[in-house]
Amino acid sequence: MAKKKTSGSAGMNERTDIKTPVSEMIRKFKKQKNAVVALFFIIVLVIIALVGEYLVPFGINEYDYSAILQGPSMAHWFGTDEFGRDLFSRIICGTRISLAVGLSAVTVGAVCGTVLGLLGGYYGGIVDSIIMRICDTLFAFPGIILAIAIVAILGSGLGNVVIAVAVFSTPTFARLVRSRTLALKHSVFVQAARNLGASDARILFRHILPGAFPEIIVQFTMSVGSSILTASSLSFLGMGAQPPTPEWGLLLSNGRNYMLTSLHATLFPGLAIFLTVLSFNILGDGLRDALDPKLTD
């Protein structure tokens, strides 16, 4: 009887020691200390974006002409701007705008790029040639230059900024997914699905697309940071958000005229952009290492 109990407990230990891909990814990710800190910071940003406007001490357009360009104090933690508005409140409320623009633009670009990459890699021929030549054309321009050109055509505004950032994000995802599709479309399980009569759509989205998810997740995370930076740059140039919107790039632009006398007007919006972009890039690096099957530790 004792032997049976021992073998039974050993069997239970073997079952509990089974490593699933998700648990293995989490285990690897936990070892990336910088990535864990970045993830925590991004979670805090998301919470601020959702509830920040209910916690700020002042309204984002609450003017106080007796406190124009005051430095940081107990009353105004980040100081005030050229109209006496509280910078802390405006930066906190601007978190939702900057994150929304970055996430929505990359989401649109990822969806369009993924579909184009699947079609080009799977069907090949003229379809692949057309898609790749369009991507090559877009790659010929630096991202910010292409975004400026698109916004110049469509007009300023956050909606057009989202379109511009999505356009130059699309070819990156298209090439990424295409290369993965080329590697998977001749695999055994895809051939088996085709022999069983599965449709092309089912093969693409049920069998090939999940194999590209790790690369898409990593690229998506790292693209959010660059998208926030590009959107802020367009607002800084006056082509994105318009006053009195508390978008970080616009706050930075408004404070640049007072850098010599009131450094806080540009310091805190610049720090918000810097820390957010840095966190998304570090998180992307951590996810890439955690999702890489070649790394065993």
Image (spheres, rainbow, N blue to C red):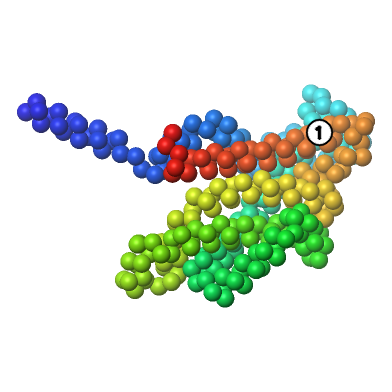
Q: Secondary structure at mark 1?
A: helix
Which residue corresponds to mark 1? 267
User: Residue 86 in the image: x percent, y percent?
Assistant: 81, 35
Up-down: is 296 above or below 141? above
- Which quarter shows the N terminus? top left
User: Residue 33 in the image: x percent, y percent?
Assistant: 54, 30
User: Residue 194 in the image: x percent, y percent?
Assistant: 36, 70
The residue lying at 79 percent from left, 48 percent from top is 233
- Looking at the image, how many numbered discs can be counted on the residues? 1
Is residue 21 found left or right of 265 in the rendered image?
left
User: Residue 173 in the image: x percent, y percent?
Assistant: 59, 57
Up-down: is 242 above or below 2? below
**Residue 196 visible in the picture:** yes
The residue lying at 54 percent from left, 38 percent from top is 286
Is residue 259 found left or right of 214 in the rendered image?
right
Residue kind at label 1, given as amino acid type: Leu
Residue 83's image quarter? top right
The residue lying at 44 percent from left, 33 percent from top is 297
